[in-house]
């Protein structure tokens, strides 16, 4: 398995400047759509009844990267360093843009879901670079001490990633919130269509990115599939059991399960495509893990949301 995954690292995704700009615009469009559901009053709600949001953010900001680090340490004999760093990068990203729809479908607390998405997305400018730099450097240093440094020279720089996240998330979110405030009628008309369009654009971004390496992707999908499935299962479980341990209401448990399990892997991909942040050679394992997460979490999230939907909200022991 290790040798199979190691061959992924040699894969490179070549984009010219126009291609990279197109990818950036796609993610900016997706985040603009997310911001159309964010209202300043939500932040007031967060501070007036903070328990569920605080628990959720702690699980997402601290719990998920920590449990991911534990997982990659356990799997280290079977997975490559680049695959492990890809998992840590995904765990460092904010919540995904489709989590609000899934929370609504599961009959969860939509207000909580949107509030968590809003806070985690707005703070991703700081949280994502800090988390990945912390856990990534810890993992790399652990490999160096073991004498198993088989990865290319990788500088996990905070500031380049910080400014990239500012550009990709900060500006679209501000514009989206301004549209929501000053053009409420227009916002209500386009919000749901943009959610559907964002999923289509994200899938297209993945397909275009890996079209030249489709055969290699198919040959290795079973290894990547298993790793992402286990990782995503742990993320969903962390959200559910963490919320349950905090004795949150059933609707809140459902939303936190989905929020912690759905990550914005699109941001991770765009960061990986930036040569000022990551080397463009030798990081294929990170690319494949991040891209497949973006596909798999839609399947797993909808599955969990459907199971929740079929359960009664009065069933406090099983939901």
Image: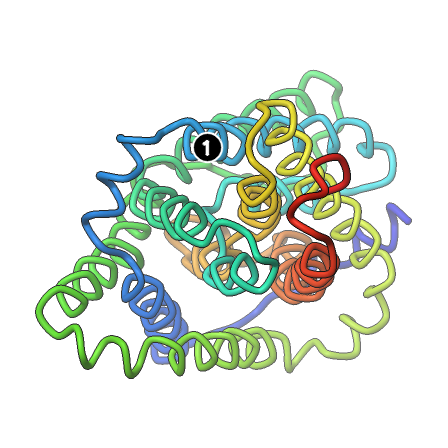
Q: Is residue 89 visible?
A: no
Residue, far left? 182
Q: Position of residue 299 (x, y in %)?
A: 70, 66
The quarter of the image holding the C terminus is top right
Left/right placement of residue 207 relative to residue 198 reads right
Does the rendering let one see residue 166? yes
The residue shown at (38%, 74%) is 26
Residue 59 in which image quadrant:
top right
Residue displayed at 66% across by 22% down: 144
- Across and down, in percent, residue 164 comes to 31, 52
- Residue occupied by mark 1: 52
Relative to residue 82, is residue 297 depicted above or below?
A: below
Residue 211 lies left or right of residue 73; in this view the side is left
Q: Nearer the viewer, residue 120 or 133?
A: 120
Up-down relation of residue 185 to residue 88 (above or below)? below
Residue found at the far top of this picture = 145
Residue at point 61%, 59% (across, down):
106
Q: Pinpoint residue 146: horizontal percent, then vertical percent.
A: 75, 19
Q: Nearer the viewer, residue 269 or 295?
A: 295
Q: Position of residue 289 (x, y in %)?
A: 67, 55
Label 1 Cα neighbours within 10 Å, binned few <14 / some 14-19 / many ≥20: many
The total number of labels drawn is 1
Secondary structure beneath disc 1?
helix
* Residue situated in front as seen by the camera: 110 or 75: 110
Q: Nearer the viewer, residue 193 or 62?
A: 193
Please tell me which residue is depicted at 29% across the width and 61% down the height of the picture.
Answer: 35
């Amino acid at each position: 398995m290790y040798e199979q995954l190691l061959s992924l690292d040699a894969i490179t995704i070549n984009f010219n400047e126009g291609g990279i700009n197109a990818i950036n615009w796609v993610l900016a469009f997706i985040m603009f759509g997310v911001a159309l559901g964010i209202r300043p009053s939500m932040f007031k709600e967060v501070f007036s009844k903070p328990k569920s949001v605080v628990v959720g953010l702690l699980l997402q900001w601290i719990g998920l990267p920590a449990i991911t680090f534990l997982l990659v340490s356990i799997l280290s004999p079977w997975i490559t360093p680049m695959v492990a760093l890809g998992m840590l990068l995904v765990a460092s990203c904010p919540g995904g843009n489709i989590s609000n729809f899934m929370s609504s479908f599961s009959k969860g607390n939509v207000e909580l879901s949107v509030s968590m998405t809003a806070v985690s997305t707005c703070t991703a400018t700081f949280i994502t670079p800090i988390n990945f730099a912390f856990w990534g450097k810890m993992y790399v240093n652990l490999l160096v001490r073991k004498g198993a440094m088989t990865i290319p020279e990788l500088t996990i720089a905070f500031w380049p990633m910080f400014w990239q996240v500012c550009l990709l998330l900060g500006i679209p979110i501000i514009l989206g919130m301004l549209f929501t405030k000053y053009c409420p009628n227009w916002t209500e008309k386009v919000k749901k269509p943009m959610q559907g369009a964002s999923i289509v654009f994200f899938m297209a971004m993945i397909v275009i990115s890996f079209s030249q390496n489709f055969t290699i992707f198919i040959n290795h999908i079973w290894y990547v599939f298993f790793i992402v499935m286990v990782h995503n299962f742990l993320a969903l479980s962390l959200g559910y059991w963490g919320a349950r341990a905090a004795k949150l209401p059933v609707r809140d448990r459902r939303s936190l399960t989905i929020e912690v399990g759905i990550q914005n892997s699109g941001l991770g991909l765009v960061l990986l495509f930036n040569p000022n942040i990551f080397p463009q050679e030798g990081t294929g394992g990170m690319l494949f893990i991040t891209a497949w997460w973006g596909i798999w979490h839609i399947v797993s999230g909808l599955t969990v949301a459907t199971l929740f939907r079929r359960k009664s909200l009065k069933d406090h022991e099983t939901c």
